[in-house]
Amino acid sequence: MHWNCCYNRLNLTKKEKLWKNFKRILLAVVAVFAVVLLVGCGAKSDNGTYVYKPTKTELKKILEDQGLSGSQLESIGDIINFEVSIKIKDSKGTLKIAGEVAGQKNERSYDVKINQKEKTISSIDGSGEKITYKVDGDYLTFDLSKLSSSNQGDLMILKNAKLKRTK
């Protein structure tokens, strides 16, 4: 009987070792899962370059919203190209607006201040209104609803723009 008692004790020890190894493996799996989850859900930055180049149909709709009539749209709709891009790097950004009408190119570039936490774009010196933006996946859109009516009119071109991340 004494041997039988010791045999059960040895057997229990093997089970305990097996259980201990199982817990270690389980802990390692949980740790790896936690790391993957934390990295995947961590703070994501909006850094990158976003570009909006409207199709001819979108461009005609924008020009129509700006007050051009049907006949004016027909005469100039096919000779206009337009592109908006914004490059975001931490708290700084560059907004570029490029256009081409009948071969005449015009490009303007503005340095802007970016607040990624509040999702706002403002002038470097802080004057003027802030434009709220939203990034959803690889697309950046603007919320112009909080702007004064005069600024909304000036920026109407960006109202329905979806800028796609390129870099």
Image (spheres, rainbow, N blue to C red):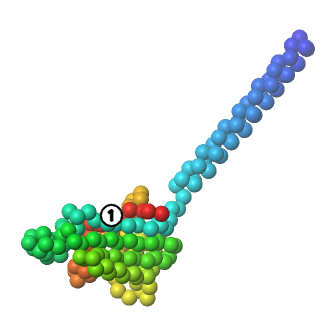
Residue lying at 38% horizontally and 77% vertically, measured from the top left: 96
Label 1 Cα crowd, 10 Å radius (few <14 / some 14-19 / many 20+): many
The residue depicted at 91 percent of the width and 14 percent of the height is 2
Residue 101: x %, y % from top left:
25, 76
Q: Quadrant of the N terminus?
A: top right
**Residue 12 vs residue 144, the one in the foreground:** 144
Q: Is residue 164 above or below residue 36?
A: below
Q: Element at badge 1?
A: strand
- Residue at (25, 80) in percent of width and height: 154
Question: Badge 1 is on which residue?
Answer: 162
Q: Quadrant of residue 78?
A: bottom left
- In the rendered image, is residue 66 in sight? yes
Image quadrant where residue 134 sits: bottom left
Position of 8 with respect to 97 (left or right) is: right
Q: In this orientation, which residue lies closer to the viewer: 162 or 73?
A: 73
39 sits to left or right of 114: right
Determine whether 149 is above or below 13 in the image: below
Q: Residue furthest top?
A: 1
Image spot of residue 110 (x, y percent): 40, 82
Q: In this image, 109 relative to 56: left or right?
A: right
Q: Reply above or below: 70 against 32.
A: below
At label 1, the amino acid type is Lys
Compare residues 75 and 162 and report the one nearer the observer.
75
Q: Return the x and y of residue 147 as percentages of the image width and height.
A: 28, 78
Q: Is residue 141 visible?
A: no
